[in-house]
C-alpha cells in the first residue's frame, strides 16, 4: 500500500524563498547587494551606478565627481562581476569650519553582478567630467544570434 506523506510547509517554504529572491533583486537595484545579510547604509550605494545593455555590450556608468583615475581600480571577475574600488579623499578646509558635509569620503568598493558574461580582456573604461563609463563586450555565447528559417 502506498504511503502518503503530508508536507504542509513545502509550498510555504518555496514561496518564501521566491519572495526572498525577489526582495534581493529589488534591493540590488538600489545598490544594496547582499540584503538582508548586510543592512544598507548611506555608503552602501556609493558610487551610484547605472547598468544597461545592447546586443553587443553591457555598459556601466558611475558618478565619481572630483576623482581621478589614480584613485580607482576596476575589475571584471568571474566573467560577470564588475568591481569598482577606490578612495575619495577627505576635503580639507584650511581656514574655516565645516557647517555641512554631505558628500561621502573614504574607501569604497562596489560589486555589481552583470546580466551576462563579458570579455574581461576587452573592457574599456573612461573617466570624463566626474562620470566613469565602462564598456564591456558580451561574450559570443551571450550575444543574440539570428536563426535563418528555411522553407520546407
Image: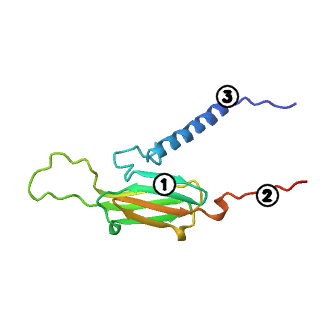
Which one is nearer the viewer's eye here, 75 or 133?
133
Could you give the CA–CA distance between mark 3 and mark 1, rounded to whole angstroms? 37 Å
Q: Which residue is the site of mark 3?
A: 8
Residue positioned most to the left:
95
Task: Give the label, 1 or 2, closer to the camera.
Answer: 2
Q: Is 77 located above or below residue 29 in the figure?
A: below
User: Where in the figure is residue 35, as x and y percent of width and height?
Assistant: 46, 44
Asked which quadrant contains residue 120, the reply is bottom right
Image side of residue 98 versus residue 11, left or right: left
Which one is nearer the viewer's eye here, 132 or 120?
132
User: How would you rate the neighbour count of disc 2 (Cα within 10 Å): few for under 14, some for 14-19, many for 20 or more?
Assistant: few
Could you give the CA–CA distance between mark 2 and mark 3, rounded to whole angstroms? 49 Å
Mark 1 or 2, nearer chain start: 1
Could you give the CA–CA distance between mark 1 and mark 2, rounded to whole angstroms? 35 Å
Residue 92 circle label: none
Residue visible at 9% across and 53% down in the picture: 96
Residue visible at 21% across and 48% down in the picture: 101
Q: Is 22 located above or below residue 123 in the figure?
A: above
Asked which quadrant contains residue 148, the reply is bottom right
Q: Is 28 located above or below residue 139 in the figure?
A: above
Q: Is 11 located above or below residue 61 in the figure?
A: above
Is the image coloured rainbow, by chain, by secondary structure, or in one colour?
Answer: rainbow
At mark 2, the secondary structure is loop
Image side of residue 92 versus residue 30, left or right: left
Asked which quadrant contains residue 116, the reply is bottom right
At mark 1, the secondary structure is strand
Residue 148 circle label: 2
Residue 112 circle label: 1
User: Where in the figure is residue 113, as x and y percent of width and height?
Assistant: 52, 54
User: Could you tell me if the residues under marks 3 and 1 are in contact, i.e. CB atoms within 8 Å?
Assistant: no
Amino acid at each position: 500500500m502506498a504511503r502518503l506523506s503530508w508536507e504542509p510547509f513545502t509550498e510555504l517554504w518555496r514561496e518564501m524563498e521566491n519572495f526572498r529572491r525577489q526582495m534581493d533583486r529589488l534591493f540590488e537595484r538600489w545598490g544594496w547587494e547582499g540584503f538582508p545579510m548586510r543592512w544598507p547604509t548611506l555608503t552602501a550605494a556609493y558610487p551610484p551606478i547605472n547598468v544597461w545593455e545592447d546586443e553587443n555590450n553591457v555598459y556601466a556608468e558611475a558618478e565619481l565627481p572630483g576623482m581621478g583615475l589614480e584613485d580607482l581600480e576596476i575589475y571584471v571577475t568571474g566573467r560577470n562581476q564588475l568591481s569598482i574600488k577606490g578612495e575619495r579623499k577627505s576635503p580639507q578646509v584650511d581656514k574655516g569650519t565645516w557647517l555641512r558635509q554631505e558628500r561621502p569620503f573614504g574607501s569604497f568598493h562596489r560589486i555589481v553582478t552583470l546580466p551576462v558574461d563579458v570579455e574581461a580582456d576587452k573592457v574599456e573604461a573612461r573617466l570624463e567630467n566626474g562620470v566613469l563609463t565602462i564598456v564591456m563586450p558580451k561574450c559570443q555565447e551571450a550575444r543574440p544570434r539570428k536563426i535563418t528559417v528555411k522553407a520546407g
